[in-house]
Image: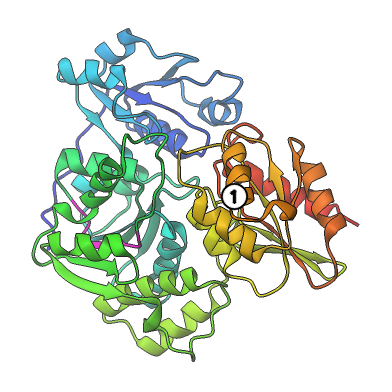
Amino acid sequence: MKSIKPFPSFKDKNVLILGLGLLGRGVKDAIFFAEAGAKVTVTDLKTKEQLTDSVKLLQPYKNIRYTLGKHLESDILKSDLIIRNAGVPSTSPFLKLAQDKKIPVDMDESLFAEFCPCPIIGITGTRGKSTTTTIIYTILKNLYTKGQVYLAGNIQGEATLPLIKIIKPNDLVVLELSSWQLQGFATKKISPQIAVFTNIYEDHMNSYSNMESYINDKKNIYKFQKKTDYCVMSKDNTYTVKLAKEVKSQLSWFSAKDLDKSWVLKMVGKHNRENAAAALAVGNILKLPQNKMKEIICEFPGLEHRLEFVKKVNDVAFINDTTSTTPIAGKKALESFKSPLILIAGGATKNLDQKPFARAISKITKAIILLDGTATDELEKQIKFEGGADKISGRYNNFEEAIKHAYALSLPGDTILLSPGCASFGLFANEFDRGHQFKKIVNQLK
């Protein structure tokens, strides 16, 4: 049983939201503290214009003031608490200033976890976090009977901290946790009661100095667990198999092989069988009925922007896989289809090895159309090196023209796949913007 600490009062305290962001979590945190009677300051390096939608949602609160387009030392120095957005790097001089002045810095999820009265199921990994998290939530929502089930963490638009007002000891909270959010757990030396580690692949090398520091952040999901807690790890990933030796809690393995041929999933791709197996392992820990879980998992439609079927135009299928922001994600997407593939890929760099993606492109696709970006030169070079030069059919900085070109190349029975294998910055606000634009353009095709 968790020991329950009452959540502290922030009435009349100076709370600084360091990084408002565009995805809605920072907004919900600002509202949470404003409603708790704190004097809230919101600061972000983005300008007021860039944050128009977020700022509009905060207008009703008279106890919120703003420093936008910059951070100020004076905001840091007068704070009683700083809530750091996951997008603010741990190396920020403003965080160092706070540390030097012994001003507490917290993150939404870890502050919540410290005072959460019920068990937390936390999910991390390089790929499959959102899908695995949502399958687990869907299973529990349907089959867990002792209390309510809540979904939060690194899910678009969902802030975790506001849940503290409604959560009860018999409830369950399912949190998707990025490597940056897990930095907050390290500071507090806490880990979720059930930790799920989907896999590790190379990612975010534009933000981390090396793989080791990236993996070290991920490890916080199990690092502070007790012997009575559970850690669910992938048997199909070399990194997680190695890391499992460090786990002190009760270890539970999962593999795509856990689902025999009778499990016919709506989601395509072997990687989604791995995600489903991870969710099943959590259900087994909670002793939920196998036959009911099978039903829910097989019916699960997958998530928006992840190998999402958009529509067929003249028997050509359009698939939106915009959250493929790493070469390994692009490779796995290509391996998920049997039909002839026209791929739209390329974009901004994360300093990752493009070779495996380029090899798969050269072997599997019928044609590839490239989107301009800081990673695209290297991707194009590697495709040519792997013998796929004749597959390259143009390079665009206009998304609509790229999609229309792909469609012009297609024949009935083909699949046009947006799976960039690269980050979205440059042509798009973020990967979700890229996915929404893709769907909008596809839906207008005749």
What residue is drawn where x is 22% and y is 32%? Answer: 9
What's the magenta region? 191-199
- Give the side of residue 238 with respect to residue 378, left or right: left
Lateral position of residue 130 relative to residue 33, left or right: right
Q: Secondary structure at mark 1?
A: helix
In the displayed structure, 146 sits above or below 128; it is: below
Is 195 covered by the magenta stretch? yes
Colour setup of the view: rainbow
Q: Position of residue 240 (x, y in %)?
A: 27, 62
Coordinates of residue 264 in the picture (x, y in percent): 54, 85
Q: Is residue 251 left or right of residue 311?
A: left
- Quadrant of image for the N terminus: bottom left
In the depicted view, which residue is nearer to us: 42 or 208? 208
Q: Position of residue 220 (x, y in %)?
A: 21, 49
* Point 54% across, 60% down: residue: 331
Residue 61 visible in image: yes
Q: Is residue 170 visible?
A: no
Task: Name which quarter of the figure residue 143 lies in.
Answer: bottom left
Q: How many marks?
A: 1
Where is residue 359 shown, x and y percent of the image? Answer: 56, 58
Badge 1 density bin: few <14, some 14–19, many ≥20, Cα 10 Å: some
Amino acid type at circle 1 is: Phe
At a point 31% along the width and 8% down the height, the residue shown is 74
Instruction: Give the quadrant of the C terminus.
Output: bottom right
Camera-nearest residue between 250 and 145: 250
Judging depth in this view, the residue of 144 and 434 nearest the camera is 434
The answer to whether residue 304 is above or below residue 280 is above
- The residue that disc 1 covers is 385
